[in-house]
Image (cartoon, helix red, strand yellow):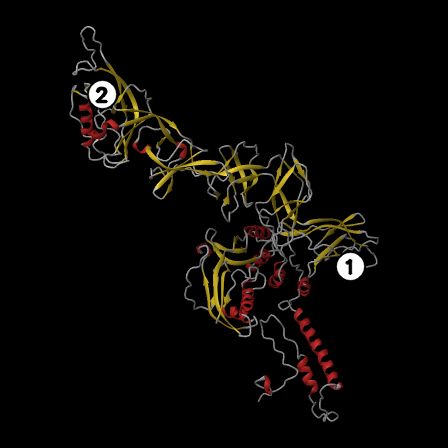
């Protein structure tokens, strides 16, 4: 039987049995701690004789104190032994310095912090160009809890005057805006000549009398609207939907009649009615022939009878079959121009306050002279009168129209109110119809520059900036008063809010503040491998092709020395130096030993450094990188509607452990899928990468697909790195890794003696902290599989948590996630959660509920 007790309370075992099964992140190497050492020292040894009868005393026993001193010493020694062995292995090393020392043996250098870079827009006042010299500094306005960042121009830039163009999104061209059952139009500027109840004519600018190109609309409301730029326009709301919802406002007119007349209605005047002169609309063919003498009252009665004989109007017919035109017999000889509209209105006897309307396009006018005392059978003939009698002429006219269009109401008996029929003509515009100004801009919206349109050489780089300082980058391919054409517009996370600006004076910048002439120390030719530390940190590293380069320049006795990756293979006289970062991101500058690389020459303060410092993933938000530290004459301001990009933090420990051993196998060239993954992951700005073997259906051969997170700029950086190392015969497809959003829900059983709120907060941090949480944004890898047991372990690691219940892991594709909501959870049975190829899990919503 084994002497080892089944329960620790059944016996005491010392030294402890060391057991390290595979897969642990720490090494257990201590044979005991203070308590076990003290216990062991106080026990009698086998066959002990000298101290066999000694019994440890209580307070003041110096023997016990001596034992405890040795127990403390043993506790400390075993603690540091365990820490030393833990730092000796790549998987378990948790100190940055130890990890870097291990991977340095492989020739692998962890990627330092990389500085963000991008473009800013400069606005120049006056008429003369302004030159910004290399190193011109701009500082950010930090948010709460953040530090300001300094960016500098990467080279000299000469900027033309201006650099800012006022633009508006192309307005919605539609004529009609619908609001429930009502419709409205928009007039440019402030129009005060329109009031509620006005009857206006809305017709096509070029009108051929077609029935579907005109309406009479009754105004129900007139109000002023402000455009995004603050200019006032007039909204005219009608009491019904007049249609024309898809028509363009520029093709239409809104008109008011300036002249009116009435039907010819002189009592007992003989008149003649002929075919084509009867005011009809879609009536049956009349059987009148010849001249029919009748009084005006009879004429109107006949007209009314003809009108009332129809059962309905058919707007699809524009002309009475066999009739050359519709005619209206008017009072007087009012002059009506051809192509004018004639509006005929009369009260509706069936409803008080309602007006029936007809409208037609004037195509001709005939002036007539009848004689009130002439022959009733021929009123147009000059009468033969007795002496001292004079002929009494009656002047009137007949207006021919191309068609008569029913606007509203049913046809009633016009005879009952023929005296109330009113005809309106002489239409005049009440304003200029315009489309509704857009308040936002997206990728489908055009741009219209406001005059004057400046001269800009196109194509050119440009920023589009909205009123809140956000924007998008684009290339300006065309600019005229008719519109601005943009190409390669960067994705818009949200529509831009008008009013907008086009910013064309772009300059390249990168993060980092310049330090010039910093004395590192004095060279000593008698000392090998001298080393100095830069005063400012972190040293700025800029992306350079597939890799990165430091901004450090070393001058020794007025001579530039060259930075190299390592001293390996360097001749004894080579003026070279090497840099490395410690755990605090302080940069150490190392010089040769006279065997590999030259020693420093002796001198007083003869080692001088110039460099820039600052870097990392954190970048200023759009609109905040605009503080000019040293005013420049003629420079009106700096804008950054588009955030800078490409910054990255130093490689975390997990990434170093994962890719350092693999880098030894690549030797700067890619053969296997893992090689492509390692090279992509080491590219500046790449947070995560994963390679998959796939099949190329076009080339009918295997290819490597490399998924890269988390931005398109990271994909570009990885592509550049792989192009320098890939097998030219191997097709590689690089693409952005899409996230798989999921909702995590669980309940916690918390000990009664713990306050619930702090425990819940710690659990949330253990799950979603960006850098340390199980599902942290900087922790989750592409294709990483998660188990429910991992979630349980992360929660149970928080003091006070007794149990985890009701765990639910629900995945929903990001593009199907409604804003502010989550679909009902699906039944969850599998404790293993596997993302799709090339995807990674992203914790979108976390619900943690303490149990009562």
Q: Residues within 10 Å of mark 2 (few under 14, many from 20)?
A: few
State the quadrant of the N terminus.
Answer: bottom right
First in residue order: circle 2 vs circle 1: 2
Q: How far apart are marks 2 and 1 (CA)?
A: 122 Å
Name of the residue lying farthest toward the front: 388
Q: Where is residue 821 in the image (x, y as percent from the top left)?
A: 44, 57
Residue shown at 71% from the left, 58% from the top: 586
Residue shown at 53% from the left, 32% from the top: 451
Q: Residues within 10 Å of mark 1 (few under 14, many from 20)?
A: many
Question: What residue does disc 2 label?
Answer: 266
Q: In this view, does 790 lie above or below 404?
A: below
**Residue mark closest to the camera, 2 vs 1:** 2
Q: Where is residue 519 in the image (x, y as percent from the top left)?
A: 78, 52
Find residue 584 and name its label.
Answer: none
Name of the residue lying farthest toward the top: 387
Find residue 529 and name its label.
Answer: 1
Contact? badges 2 and 1 (CB < 8 Å): no
Q: In this view, does 653 lie above or below 192?
A: below
Residue nearest the viewer, comparing 343 with 84: 343
**Splitting the image into 4 quarters, where does residue 144 fall?**
bottom right
Residue nearest the viewer, comparing 559 with 76: 76
**Splitting the image into 4 quarters, where does residue 432 fall?**
top left
SS class, disc 2: loop
Residue shown at 18% from the left, 7% from the top: 386
Relative to 658, 431 lies left or right: left
SS class, disc 1: loop
Q: In this view, does 189 lie above or below 703?
A: above
Q: Where is residue 564 in the image (x, y as percent from the top left)?
A: 71, 53
**Splitting the image into 4 quarters, where does residue 708 fall?**
bottom right
């Amino acid at each position: 039987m084994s002497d080892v007790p089944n329960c620790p309370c059944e016996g005491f075992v010392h030294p402890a049995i060391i057991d390290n099964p595979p897969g642990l992140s720490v090494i257990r190497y201590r044979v005991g701690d203070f308590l076990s050492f003290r216990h062991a020292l106080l026990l009698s040894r086998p066959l002990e004789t000298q101290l066999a009868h000694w019994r440890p005393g209580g307070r003041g026993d110096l023997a016990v104190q001596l034992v405890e001193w040795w127990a403390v010493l043993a506790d400390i020694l075993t603690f540091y032994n365990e820490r030393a062995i833990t730092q000796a292995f790549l998987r378990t090393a948790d100190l940055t310095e130890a990890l870097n020392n291990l991977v340095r043996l492989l020739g692998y250098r962890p990627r330092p912090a990389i500085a963000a870079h991008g473009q800013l827009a400069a606005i120049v006042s006056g008429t003369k160009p302004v030159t910004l010299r290399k190193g011109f500094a701009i500082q950010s306005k930090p948010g709460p809890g953040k530090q300001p960042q300094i960016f500098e121009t990467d080279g000299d830039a000469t900027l033309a005057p201006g650099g800012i163009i006022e633009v508006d999104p192309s307005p919605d061209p539609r004529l009609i805006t619908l609001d429930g059952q009502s419709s409205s139009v928009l007039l440019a500027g402030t129009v005060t000549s329109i009031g509620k109840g006005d009857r206006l004519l809305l017709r096509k600018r070029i009108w051929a009398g077609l029935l579907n190109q005109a309406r009479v609309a009754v105004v129900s409301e007139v109000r002023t609207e402000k455009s995004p730029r603050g200019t006032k326009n007039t909204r005219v709301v009608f009491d019904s939907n007049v249609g024309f919802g898809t028509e363009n406002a520029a093709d239409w007119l809104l008109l008011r009649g300036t002249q009116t007349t009435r039907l010819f209605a002189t009592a007992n005047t003989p008149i003649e009615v002929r075919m084509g002169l009867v005011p009809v609309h879609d009536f049956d063919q009349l059987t009148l022939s010849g001249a029919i003498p009748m009084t005006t009252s009879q004429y109107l009665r006949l007209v009314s009878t003809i009108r009332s004989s129809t059962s309905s109007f058919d707007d699809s017919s524009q002309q009475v079959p066999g009739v050359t035109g519709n005619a209206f017999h008017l009072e007087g000889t009012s002059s009506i121009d051809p192509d004018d509209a004639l509006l005929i209105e009369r009260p509706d006897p069936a409803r008080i306050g309602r007006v029936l309307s007809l409208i037609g396009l004037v195509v001709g006018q005939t002036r007539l002279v009848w004689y009130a005392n002439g022959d009733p059978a021929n009123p147009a003939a000059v009468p033969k009168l007795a002496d001292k009698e004079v002929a009494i002429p009656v002047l009137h006219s007949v207006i021919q129209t191309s068609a008569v269009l029913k606007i509203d109401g049913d046809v009633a008996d016009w005879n009952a109110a023929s005296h109330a029929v009113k005809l309106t003509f002489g239409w005049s515009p009440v304003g200029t119809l315009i489309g509704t100004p857009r308040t936002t801009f997206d990728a489908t919206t055009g741009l219209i520059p406001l005059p004057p349109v400046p001269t800009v050489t196109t194509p050119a780089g440009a920023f589009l900036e909205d009123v809140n300082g956000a924007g998008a980058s684009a290339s300006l391919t065309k600019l005229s008063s008719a519109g601005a054409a943009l190409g390669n517009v960067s994705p818009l996370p949200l529509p831009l809010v008008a009013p907008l600006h086009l910013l064309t004076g772009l300059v390249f910048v990168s993060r980092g503040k310049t330090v010039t002439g910093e004395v590192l120390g004095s060279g000593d030719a008698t000392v090998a491998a001298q080393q100095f530390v830069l005063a400012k940190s972190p040293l700025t590293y800029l992306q350079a092709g597939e890799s990165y380069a430091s901004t450090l320049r070393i001058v020794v006795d007025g001579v530039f020395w060259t930075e190299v990756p390592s001293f390996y293979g360097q001749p004894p006289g080579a003026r070279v130096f090497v840099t490395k970062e410690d755990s605090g991101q302080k940069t150490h500058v190392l010089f040769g030993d006279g065997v590999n690389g030259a020693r420093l020459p002796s001198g007083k303060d003869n080692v001088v450094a110039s460099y820039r410092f600052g870097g990392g993933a954190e970048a200023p938000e759009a609109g905040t990188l605009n503080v000019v530290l040293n005013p420049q004459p003629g420079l009106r301001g700096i804008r950054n509607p588009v955030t800078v990009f490409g910054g990255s933090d130093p490689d975390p420990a997990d990434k170093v452990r994962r890719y350092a051993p693999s880098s030894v196998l690549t030797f700067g060239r890619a053969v296997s899928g893992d090689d492509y993954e390692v090279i992509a992951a080491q590219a500046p700005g790449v947070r995560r990468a994963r390679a998959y073997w796939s099949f190329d259906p076009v080339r009918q051969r295997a290819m490597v697909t490399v998924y890269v997170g988390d931005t398109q700029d990271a994909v570009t950086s990885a592509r550049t790195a792989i192009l320098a190392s890939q097998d030219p015969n191997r097709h590689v497809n690089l693409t952005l890794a899409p996230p798989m959003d999921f909702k995590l829900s669980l309940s916690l059983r918390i000990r009664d003696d713990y306050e619930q709120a702090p425990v819940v907060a710690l659990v949330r941090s253990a799950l979603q902290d960006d850098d340390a949480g199980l599902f942290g944004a900087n922790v989750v890898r592409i294709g990483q599989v998660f188990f429910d047991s991992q979630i349980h372990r992360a929660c149970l690691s928080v003091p006070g948590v007794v149990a985890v219940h009701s765990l639910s892991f629900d995945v929903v594709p990001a593009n199907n996630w409604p804003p502010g909501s989550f679909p009902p959870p699906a039944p969850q049975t599998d404790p293993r959660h596997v993302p799709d190829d090339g995807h990674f899990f992203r914790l979108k919503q976390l619900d943690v509920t303490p149990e009562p």
